Structure formats: structure tokens, C-alpha cells
Amino acid sequence: MCINPAQISIMIDRQLPMPGTCAHCQGPATRQCKGCVASTAWYCTADCQKIHWPEHRFECAPTRELTTADELARAVYRRRAPDDDDTLQQYGFAYLWTHQGETLFQVYISVLGDSGVPAKRLHQWRVSGRLFDELKTELGRHPGEPHQYLYTWLLQNPWIFDNEAVMRPDFLIFRPHKTPIIEYAGLPKWYTDEHLKNANMPKLWQQCFSLHVQVLADLDHRARIFGHHDEWVVFGFAACITEDVEAELLAVYDMLMWDCTFEEYYTAYRSASLLALFDAKGLGDSIREFDCLLDLLSTSPSAIRLVYFLKQSVLWDNVPLRPDVAKYFGFVSCRTTEERAQLKSLYKRLFVEVLVDPVHLHLAAARGKLYEVACLLVAMSDTEGTLFRRLLKEECPSSVAEHLLFARYTEGVDMTASGNLS
């Protein structure tokens, strides 16, 4: 097929593949899109042409008017979040920040990319008010762990698709409050963790930033929003014994952030003096109502008990277990996946049913008494007792120096020896 010079110029200007190169896989290509007026896209197979369609339809002869669903489908193909306001608003991104927004984008990657739902159908779901229900149904068809995680997350966040909720005036007041921080870091309006990394801001700044924008963004939908990430541990949510207490703590952070600048809050955090900042802003009594929290906040982020990372890994799926936690809390002696699951279940019972204070488990680990404490607090079968005796007594350290049961952070240096806060 003959290509005229004008078409080659278009390819160069748009940085498109040259003739003979597949627009999707970059392999040798012999076919072109028959629908194009100025055919600039080459393909090696019909499959590559189909996969590339969400991208190509923006330059192809239109068969229908382009919609925000097409914008989202192209973003999914590129694996980069959409950046136009209409798409962000209509598909639930506009009032989500960092981790929540990334998870929602993964939902669309699963539905549009993995399951192959076309943009036209997604558009129909949205305009008919069925977007949430159809996304839920589509994710529910897949038994794999990633899909099930997204399915569970979606069930917990139906408000994202409630247009009346997200358009309330009290949601809109948060954008101006966040904008200066976002502009200071050079971030786009809708940013991802990758944007934060590329902004080259210090790790502690990123943690403060993430907490700051998510606390101020969520209002009625804020409880337990940080479980898979650093913030849930370093800002004290891991010390709360129930979800209700976490929500109450989040409300106190909300009051603090309306009454101080980001720089004040960041400076206090990096110097382990958040409690002093709460005092200075008249919130000392409120924060001290959380007895469980004072121990953690008095040293975070410079030193944090490993038991809080244990709790995070136990309560939240897909959170890797730190090597030092595995070493001092029995997991390193597990011989099978089943034994690991049983030990995880034991700790979950301690945290969720018994509501054990994490500091008590820290002290038990230091003194080699994890098995005794578990037996005292949780009923076990003979089989469980035999297993946990081996994991927590016979093959667990008989004592551990206190300093080894802390993760430590120095500005500019990752958490030492045992891992980091990431």
C-alpha cells in the first residue's frame, strides 16, 4: 500500500509508528485500518487492532460521537489515569485522592481492559444510572484474588457513584484548601503515587500529604481509609482497638488540619512532636482521650513498634509481612501456607475479638511469652495448641532486646535492617 509524504509527516508530528510497525505491539505490520481517512495506523493482526481500538478511535473515522467513556477507555489502554474534568467527574474520580483514586482506576482496568467491556456499554451503564451495579456484577464474575479485592472495595464505597453526594457544596470547599499543597509539589489535579515519587518529595512529606488530602476530602466516608498504606500505622490508626475509634481519631485529625498550616503539621510529624501540636491547637484533651494512641504518637515516625505492622498485615489483605515481624512473631517458623494462615487467624482473633492492646503483645514478644499470652486470652483446640506452642514458644526467641522490636527511621534513610515504611 502506498503512503504519501503528507501521511508520513503526520506520523512524525504525532510520534506515531512508521509504516510497517504495529501500533500496538511494535512488531512488523502489513495491514492498516480501513476506516481511516488518512490511514496512519498499521497492525500485524486483527487482535492487535482490536486491543488498540480505544486509542485509535480518536483518530479514526468516527462511527459515533466520542464520550467520556471513550476517554476513560483510552486512559485504561495507556495505563495512565484520565486527566480531563468531565471524565473525572462522571466516573467517580473527582473527589478521590491518591490511594482511593488508584483503586478506582484499577476497577476500570479490570472491567474495560481485562474483561473487555467496550466503552459504549460503559457509557450506557452511566447514563442509565446503573454504573455501580454493573461494575459490581462484572467484578463478581471473576474469582481471582485481585478481582475479589476490587469487588470488596467497590462494595465499601458505593457513595463514589452517588452524584448527589459528591456534588454537595460541603465537598466542593475542600479543593481550594488542597490546591496550594498540590501546586507546591508540582502535582496534577488528579495524582497517583507515581506522581508523588516523581515529585521527589521526602517520604515523610508524602505521608503527611496523603493523610492531609484524604482526611479533608472524605467527610462521611473516611473510616479506615489508610489500612493498606503507611498512614494507617504512622499516624496512629493501628493503635485504635475498633473501627469506631479509628473514625473518632480521624475526626480529631480533621479539626487539627483546619487549624494549622501544612508546614506546621509536617514539621511536628517529622520531629515526633504531633502531641505537642495537638496541645498548641487546643486539641490536647481530645487526643489524650485515645489512651492507646499516646505510645505510638510519642515516637512516630522515628521509632514504631513492630507489633503495629503485625496488626496491619493481619487485618488487611495484600499487606506484605515485614521480615522482622515474621522473625519475632512466629511466622518465620511456619512450614506451610496453612500454618501461616492459622497463625494469622490467631492474631486476628486477638486484635478483633479480644481487643488486645498491641503494646501487650510487644512486651510478650520481648519476654518470650507470646504463647502464654495467647493461651490466656484465646480458647484453642489441642491441635491449635500444639501448633502455636511450636511457633510461639519452642521455635520463637526466648527473649528479644526491646530495640529490635522497633522499626526506626532517620530522615533520608529507609527504615533500618528490617524493611521500610512503604
Image: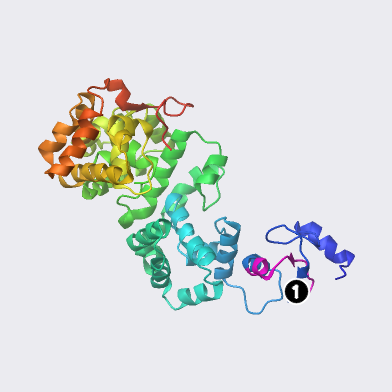
- Residue depicted at x 30% and y 57%: 220
Classify mark 1: residues with Cα within 10 Å, few (<14), some (14-19) or many (20+).
some
State which quarter of the image contains the N terminus: bottom right
- Identify the amino acid type marked 1: Cys
| Residue 1 magenta | no
Q: How many labels does the image show?
A: 1
| Residue 41 magenta | yes
Visible residue check, residue 285: no
As drawn, 129 above or below 266: below
- Residue depicted at x 51% and y 61%: 109
As drawn, 389 above or below 126: above
* Figure colour scheme: rainbow
Residue segment shown in magenta: 37-50
Residue that badge 1 annotates:
36
- Residue depicted at x 23% and y 22%: 399
Q: Which of 164 and 339 is in front in this view?
A: 339
Where residue 218 appears, as percent x and y from the top left, is 36, 54
Where residue 243 appears, as percent x and y from the top left, is 24, 49
Visible residue check, residue 112: yes
State which quarter of the image contains the C terminus: top left
Q: Which of 149 and 182 is in front in this view?
A: 149
As drawn, 99 above or below 160: above
- Residue depicted at x 25% and y 29%: 395
Identify the element where label 1 is drawn.
loop
Q: Nearer the viewer, residue 103 or 129?
A: 103
As drawn, 116 above or below 382: below
Where residue 72 appears, as percent x and y from the top left, is 55, 64
Where residue 259 appears, as percent x and y from the top left, is 34, 41
Position of residue 73 in the picture relative to residue 365 (left or right): right
